[in-house]
Amino acid sequence: MKIYVDADACPVKDIIISEGTKAAIPVILVTSFSHFSNVEQPSGVETIYVDSGADAADYRIMKLATKGDIIVTQDYGLASLGLAKGCTVLHHTGYTYTNENIDQLLQSRYFSAMARKSGKRTKGPKPFTTEDKEKFKGLFKIAISQ
């Protein structure tokens, strides 16, 4: 098992790195070159840099991930692909993407995109809270212990 993180805007990288390394599970942060950092990561954590193009991190994660891996992302498209590959896919606010909820999430994304395209304004994501972080931590601990 490996943990892949769509890391450009992931607010729970610290939890993933801490809990993943404690459990001796390799953590792979996939991020764009525009987020380059010289910060040294702990042993067991690898950073892969990709072009800043749309979906470059998603494509790299899908190239590397195999059945049984964990993917952390807020991207519904990547989540859908990860589920199809047999991965456990988590959202940073503390819920698991499933075959039962992914269709509704993708449809919601589509309708929001169509509304924006026609000039309407749509709501953005809710602010990330301490409760979200704690909920993710609990869910993540369960996921890595299975």
Image: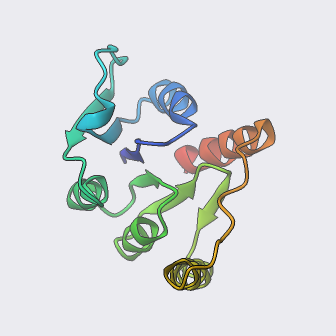
Q: In this view, does 81 lie above or below 124?
A: below
Is 112 on the left-hand or right-hand side of 130? Answer: left
Is 3 on the left-hand or right-hand side of 92? Answer: left
Toward the viewer: 98 or 54?
54
Scheme of image coloration: rainbow
Q: Dividing the picture into quarters, in which one does residue 50 lie?
A: top left
Which residue is pictured at 80% across the width and 41% down the height?
A: 131
Q: Where is residue 21 in the image (x, y as percent from the top left)?
A: 45, 26
Q: Residue furthest front?
A: 119
Q: How many labels does the image show?
A: 0
Toward the viewer: 113 or 119?
119
Is 87 on the left-hand or right-hand side of 140? Answer: left
Q: Position of residue 120 (x, y in %)?
A: 62, 78
Which residue is pictured at 47% across the width and 62% down the height?
A: 75
Which residue is pictured at 57% across the width and 37% down the height?
A: 11
Toward the viewer: 111 or 120?
120
Is 53 on the left-hand or right-hand side of 93? Answer: left
Q: Position of residue 83 (x, y in %)?
A: 43, 71
Q: Dividing the picture into quarters, in which one does residue 133 lie?
A: top right
Q: Is residue 106 above or below residue 5?
A: below
Q: Is residue 68 above or below residue 103?
A: above
Q: Position of residue 22 (x, y in %)?
A: 51, 24
Which residue is pictured at 49% across the width and 31% down the height?
A: 23
